[in-house]
Amino acid sequence: MAKAAIGSSPRTVTPIRRNLGRLPQELPRIERVVEPSSTLCPCGCGAMTRIGEDRAERLDIVPAQFRVIVTIRPKYACRICSSAVVQAPAPAHLIEGALPTEALVAHVLVSKYADHVPLYRQAQAYARSGLDLHRATLADWVGKAAFHLQPVVDRMAQHLKRSSKLFLDETTAPVLDPGRGKTKTGYLWALVRDDRRWGGSDPPGVVYAYAPGRGTEQAEAVLRGFTGTLQVDGYAAYKALARRPRPEGPLVLAHCWAHGRRQLRELFDRDGSAVAEEGLRRIAELYAIEAELKGSAPEARRAVRQDRAKPLVEAFGAWLAGCRAKLSPKSRAGEKLAYFANHWDGLRVYLEDGQVEIDSNAVGNTIRPIALGRRNALFAGHDEGGRAWGRIASLIETAKMNGVEPFAYLSATREALPKGHPQSRLDELLPWAFSSTSSRLRKGVQTPLTTRSSQHA
């Protein structure tokens, strides 16, 4: 080990973090006791007494195993009269008469939309277990699951739109255009609520709405029923929407400092621009203040922003005006600075409202899973496939945002729906309402089944 130079402070070595000996307590433990070949004292004193033990844990896995659940409904008849025959009704299933259980469909959904394994790869994996399941069959299961889960997603959207502030962004969703042999560009609009940075009581959530375009009309359809502050990027459709009279009430646009910072970063990385460097330095001061405010109440955030951030923003505005007066609007630097000038009012909104964030990064985080799925699956089969994509992804990503395991949640929800769960209690099926008591599947506890050998006497 190298010695530190004389007079210098000793170098601090950061320990490497490994998950050795800290396996999750909720995982089942299978204990295997390894006894010595003999517990008799070698001196001839007799049996020795146990004085302790050493324990070592290793992580194991049981590969996914398919099984067939056979539902048997005995019939009973009276031997005296011939008019009485009784039989238990067939259990209700979400996909009546279909092959999969609710758990298997949930596994397909989670594999596709949480782990980003496209259906054709899942079909290949099932084939290794001897199951011939074509991806068209899996796609049919996904479509039916999305149809039955639509009321839950619609209810979740209603909850989000009751908030006073939301995020909105859109991303491409390539969709096959039947009859042309090509794909067309659809869009998934992500409507997000995330108040965790200021300790809001409303649970976080995201709803993805599929639309064939990304214009003002599509944005209006996604936001119908919402009024308040909308945190967005600089896309022109949002400004057009904010200028429209809306029956719900006006929209206040809060624009994103991170998008402007990204513009300056690109300029600096390409040209080493002194203007970009100065802009980045000034924006870094604003973000340093925000880092200190993480977890603070809205009132405290607003007070600090007014006291410390507002003078910096005003100074940034003066610096911006000075730079633009010296630069051609058509120069690379002039084009990058135009973002700040064109969205200056929206960039100042966060100073006046402690519930508003300095950027729209929260919605950007919900777009990444869509991009991963898009890269692996390439396209949806049709517009309805795009809608199914949005619905299932809404439930899975909202579950993840609330620390809920998606497979357990979807399994429990899909089991509850065919049993006649009332529409008036849909709130109980929302991802943030799911808890460890909602389903026995959460801890891997299976419903007892009566098993019978497949060989008959």
Image: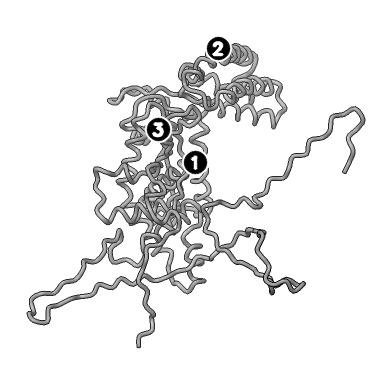
Label 1 secondary element: helix
What's the amino acid at mark 1? Ile
Mark whose residue sits in front, 2 or 3: 3
Q: Residue at x 29, y 26 (%)?
A: 248
Residue at mark 3: 202
Above or below for 334 versus 135: above
- Callout 3 crowding tier (Cα within 10 Å): few <14, some 14–19, many ≥20: some
**Contact, CB < 8 Å: mark 1 with mark 3?**
no
Q: Residues within 10 Å of mark 1 (few under 14, many from 20)?
A: many
The reply to whether residue 180 is visible in this rendering is: no
- Looking at the image, is 290 positioned above or below residue 441? above
**Disc 1 or 3, which lies upstream in sequence?**
3
Q: Residues within 10 Å of mark 2 (few under 14, many from 20)?
A: few
Q: Earlier in the sequence, mark 1 or mark 2?
A: 2
At label 2, the amino acid type is: Asp
Mark 3 element type: loop
Amino acid under label 3?
Asp
Q: Is residue 57 above or below residue 236?
A: below
- Residue 445 image point, x, y percent: 42, 59
| Distance Cα–Cα, label 1 vs label 2 | 34 Å
- Residue 150 location, x and y as percent? 32, 47
* Pointer 2 with pointer 3, Cβ within 8 A: no
The residue furthest bottom is 457
Q: Which residue is mark 2?
A: 307
Upstream in sequence: badge 2 or badge 3: 3
- The residue that mark 1 highlights is 367
Indicate which label's residue lies in the foreground, 1 or 2.
2
